[in-house]
Every structure is written in C-alpha cells, then in structure tokens.
Image (cartoon, rainbow, N blue to C red):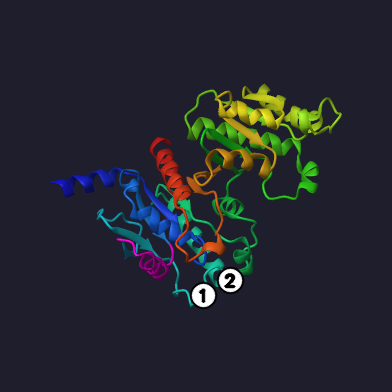
Amino acid sequence: MKSTSATTVSARLPLLGITMGDPAGIGPEVIAKAVAGRRLRNVCHPIVIGSFPVMEQTIKALNLKLKALRVDSHERQPWREGTVAVLDPLEQPLKRFTQGVAAAATGAASVAFIKKGVELAQIGCIDGIVTAPINKEAINMAGCRYPGHTELLADLTRAKESGMMIIGGPLRIMFVTTHVAIKDLPSLLTRAKIEKAIRLAQLALTQLFGIKKPRIGIAALNPHAGEHGLFGNEESRVILPAARAAQARGILASNPLPADTLFGKAVHGEYDGVVALYHDQGLIPLKLMAFGTCVNLTVGLPIIRTSVDHGTAFDIVGKGLADPGSLLEAITLAATIARVRP
C-alpha cells in the first residue's frame, strides 16, 4: 500500500525537464546531487534531458546511491527511490571530451538538450524546463550565436518579448540590460527598454507569483538619482518618463530611486519587485542576500523556464565541490509556478 500511495502522489506532481547544460561543466554534478536527495520527492517528477553516458559517469564518480534509467520518451515513469530518468536526444553519443574546457561538441550538445526541452514543453508533454548552465563560448564555437539561454529560448519559442528576472531571498529583480559594458550603458538605456522591463516585472509578479497589485521599485542609474541633473540626466531623460508611462497604465511603479536605498526598501517589503538597470546593480544585493540559492526566471515565454544563477564553473569540475542549492531552488520555483499557472 505504501508503494502505491507514493506512486499516486508522484503522478500528481508537475513533470519537469531538467536540461543538462554543458556536459563539460558542473551541470551533470549539480543535477545528480539534486535528484539523489529527498527534497524533490514531493516537489516534482523530474526527467533529465541530457547525455545518458555522462549522467551515468557522473553518478559513479560521485559515488551516489542513484541509478540512471534511460527512457525513450517523456512519459513519466513510476517513481522508484534511488533512480532518475534520463532522456538522451543526441543522435550519436558524445565523443571523449575534456572536463572544464569549452568545446564545440559539448556546446552543440547543450543546445540540443535545450531544444528538446523546449519542444516537449511547447507541446505540453512536460510542465516546464529547468536549465543547468551552458557555456557561452562553447555554444558559439558550435555555431549558435547567442549570448545566453534567454535569447535562445526567446527565438525557439517565438516569444514577442521576454526578459530575465532573478529571485533570491526577499528580492525579485527584473533587468533592463544584462551582459553589457558599463561604458556602453547610458546609450543602451532607452525609454522603450525600461518600459518593457516594467511590463515584464508586472507580468511576472501578477501571473507567476499571484500578487494582485504589485509595487515595483525602479532603480536610478546615477548616485542620488542624478541629484536634479548634477550627476547625470538619465533619470529625467528616460527613466522617469518610462515610470510615468507605466503609472498611467495603472502599474504601481515608483519614480527612479537611488539604488543604495531602493534595495533596502525592497528587502524590508516596501516593494514586491525591483527593476534594475544593469547586471551588477541587481546581482550584488541579490547575492549578498541569497548567494548560492538565487534562481533565474525567464519572463514572457509561453513555457515555464527557470535556471540556476551560476555558470559552468569549469575551475571546479570533477572535484565534487559543486553546490546544488541553486538548482534545487530553481526546480522548486518551476514546480510552484506549474501548479498555479493557468
């Protein structure tokens, strides 16, 4: 009776595809550690989308009490303790590669895993995808000219607009720009881009987190929000007009606020989400609050996608040091959204 009950409970859980990421990175390790633990048992029904031989070798190297089971379709398997289903979409097994080194072959494999996960999610075979890290150099070596997951996923799903929100501790942060040089930042901050980030923050907070009237704090670019033009005019020229346009549509967005005070207000609950203008402006407070457990959520896609907040960590591959905390949080968030999303 106990076994039957466990299978029944498992069958009601969201079915999530966990893409392996770059096989030469820490993706296989954090996946193996995450699914070997007990935490996910009542969270989701996972299926790893990646190289079966790599998954087997990783489990063996880590000496985990876990067995990889090769599956040929997305169909959920009866839950069995100490096992993980692996769907390998590669036509040919990966040839020998060096761990911790970017290569075209592993870059191409990581893209193939993503494409299969998106395909299954789009046709409703799985409830969402959770992605382990890819290596930007490797995917570009393979001819995939994207700066990262977010842009690739937007193209694959033909999303009208999408963006990156990172969640950690009490903070939910949507970004106007991500990986850009600081010297180029002022010219990239347009009213249209800021308005888009505010729209996406509103979408995420209402539809994915169930907040009816979210309060959104808008970060300024310059110290003291420019101090009436003394330290720059981006606030008056583009940020404030974007905020007011959002306010006119009924969004509870703030005027641009100095970042050094805005994030403290958000941590203490005065704002449900924050729009940050660039990578480090948002990531520094996030990682101070929740290093190792932050989650990347792609907003605006027709599918659910969450991801870890770290990279392939080539410097520690094969050492058994990788922390699965961020992946566990990403899986938990995806499962939560899958249960409440219409």
Q: Please, what is the three-letter code of the amino acid marked with disc 2?
A: Ala
Q: Residue at x 77, y 32 (%)?
A: 223
**Quarter residue 156 falls in:** bottom right
**Quarter residue 336 falls in:** top left
Q: Position of residue 301 (x, y in %)?
A: 54, 45
Res. 97 mark:
1
Queried whether the magenta region covers residue 59, the answer comes back as yes
**What segment carries the magenta color?**
50-65
Q: Quick check: 9 left or right of 130?
A: left
- Assign a secondary structure to mark 1: loop
Q: Is residue 271 visible?
A: yes
Of the pair 277 and 30, the residue shown nearer to us: 30
Quadrant of the drawing holding the C terminus: top left
Number of numbered labels in the structure image: 2
Q: Position of residue 147 (x, y in %)?
A: 65, 56
- Assign a secondary structure to mark 2: loop
Q: Residue at x 41, y 43 (%)?
A: 332
User: Which residue in the protein does label 2 denote?
Assistant: 103
Q: Hey, which residue is sitting farthest right in the picture?
A: 230
Instruction: Tell me the crowding category of disc 1: few under 14, some 14 to 19, or many 20 or more residues within 10 angstroms, Cα based.
Output: few
Q: Are marks 2 and 1 in contact (CB under 8 Å)?
A: yes
In the displayed structure, 324 sits above or below 174; it is below
How far apart, in angstroms, are the residues tagged by discs 2 and 1? Answer: 8 Å
Of the pair 270 and 289, the residue shown nearer to us: 289
